């Protein structure tokens, strides 16, 4: 396993990490979760990602039970949670000081830990002043309930506003962002955040590297029984990925990518993960799985990185044809 610094911090996270979104509590019970997490841990994964919203807390509960059963040394783990959707109560959502405090404490109880290493603002909250959110996150860190805080699916402007306010008031600024990033979703990580990597030392913990399974190639011939897109609750995702014109165009590209995959001897899921890892601004790639075998396959990506070389990346780029455009040089001299 390779370990990378999380942004401009001294914290190292495994290049491949493990997340529980969708699967824990839905497709994965505690026993299977234990086998999955142990497989990832044995492969060198130290970062395990979660959120209060995942299965309304059940995902955190399962992960906490697994960690307790495994008896792993706490200092060997980097645990995270994300705060925004905590329940149906009038103050159980958003990024108010009240919900950040109460949501964090509830997550810690479910995870059976005294602190999380990373805590994220799961989405921007247009109703809460960013100043209140920054103060709240700073307080959570001061109380020892989290070590670093960051954002998920915030814009570059929103992150910079939070960062500037924190610096001006001697508070802990956001360190990391958790954006969606894959071969079909590139603009935010590759262009919008480009100035933030050097300016504020932003780290990234990217999610959906396989584009909800599209980049595994398993949907090229239909929807496998038991897969995520076969679940009724994800019918909206099925329509978006497979039944829209945009989705069908992506499937055609996946078929072409599969040929590159075959020719260089790298399975499609590993090709997609390696492509993400080749971006130096990606601190860690969060992987998910519904079976132990999928975890094993994902972890083998570290063994084939050299096969996804510059030539392979160029071939992929030709197929994707979606590289974010550079800003126009109006001087042209």
Image (spheres, rainbow, N blue to C red):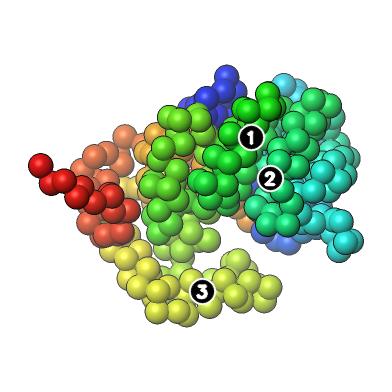
Quarter holding residue 231:
bottom right
Marks 1 and 2, Cα distance to the nearest angstrom?
8 Å
Q: Position of residue 206 (x, y in %)?
A: 53, 45
- Residue positioned most to the top: 10
Indicate left or right for 181 with 168 as reference: left
Identify the residue position indicated by label 1 in the image.
165
* Pointer 3 with pointer 1, Cβ within 8 A: no
Residue with the mark numbered 2: 130
Q: Residues within 10 Å of mark 3 (few under 14, many from 20)?
A: some
Q: How would you rate the neighbour count of disc 2 (Cα within 10 Å): few for under 14, some for 14-19, many for 20 or more? A: many
Q: Are marks 1 and 2 in contact (CB under 8 Å)?
A: yes
Q: Nearer the viewer, residue 260 or 193?
A: 193
Q: Give 75 or 97, whichever is nearer the viewer.
A: 97
Q: Is residue 42 above or below residue 94?
A: above
Q: Earlier in the sequence, mark 1 or mark 2?
A: 2
The residue carrying mark 3 is: 240
Residue 4 place in picture, x, y as percent: 50, 27
């Amino acid at each position: 396993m390779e370990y990378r610094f999380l942004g401009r911090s001294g914290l190292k996270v495994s290049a491949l990490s493990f997340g529980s979104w969708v699967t824990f509590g839905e497709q994965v019970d505690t026993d299977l979760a234990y086998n999955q997490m142990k497989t990832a841990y044995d492969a060198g994964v130290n970062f395990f990602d979660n959120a209060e919203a995942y299965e309304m807390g059940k995902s955190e509960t399962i992960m906490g039970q697994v960690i307790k059963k495994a008896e792993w040394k706490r200092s060997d783990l980097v645990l995270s949670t994300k705060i925004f959707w905590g329940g149906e109560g009038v103050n159980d959502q958003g990024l108010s000081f009240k919900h950040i405090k109460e949501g964090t404490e509830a997550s810690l109880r479910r995870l059976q830990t005294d602190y999380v290493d990373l805590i994220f603002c799961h989405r921007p909250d247009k109703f809460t002043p960013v100043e209140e959110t920054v103060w709240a996150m700073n307080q959570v860190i001061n109380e020892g309930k989290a070590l670093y805080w960051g954002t998920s699916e915030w814009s570059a402007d929103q992150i910079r506003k939070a960062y500037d306010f924190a610096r001006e008031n001697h508070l802990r600024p956001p360190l990391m962002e958790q954006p969606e990033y894959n071969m079909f979703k590139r603009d935010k990580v590759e262009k919008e955040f480009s100035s933030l990597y050097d300016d504020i030392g932003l780290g990234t913990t990217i999610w959906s590297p396989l584009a909800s399974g599209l980049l595994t190639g398993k949907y090229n011939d239909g929807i496998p029984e038991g897969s995520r897109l076969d679940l009724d609750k994800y019918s909206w995702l099925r329509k978006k990925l497979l039944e829209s014109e945009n989705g069908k165009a992506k499937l055609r590209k996946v078929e072409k990518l599969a040929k590159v995959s075959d020719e260089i001897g790298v399975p499609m899921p590993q090709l997609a993960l390696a492509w993400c890892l080749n971006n130096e601004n990606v601190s860690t790639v969060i992987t998910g799985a519904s079976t132990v075998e999928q975890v094993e396959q994902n972890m083998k990506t570290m063994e084939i990185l050299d096969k996804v070389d510059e030539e392979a990346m160029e071939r992929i780029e030709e197929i994707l044809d979606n590289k974010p455009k550079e800003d126009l040089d109006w001087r042209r001299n």
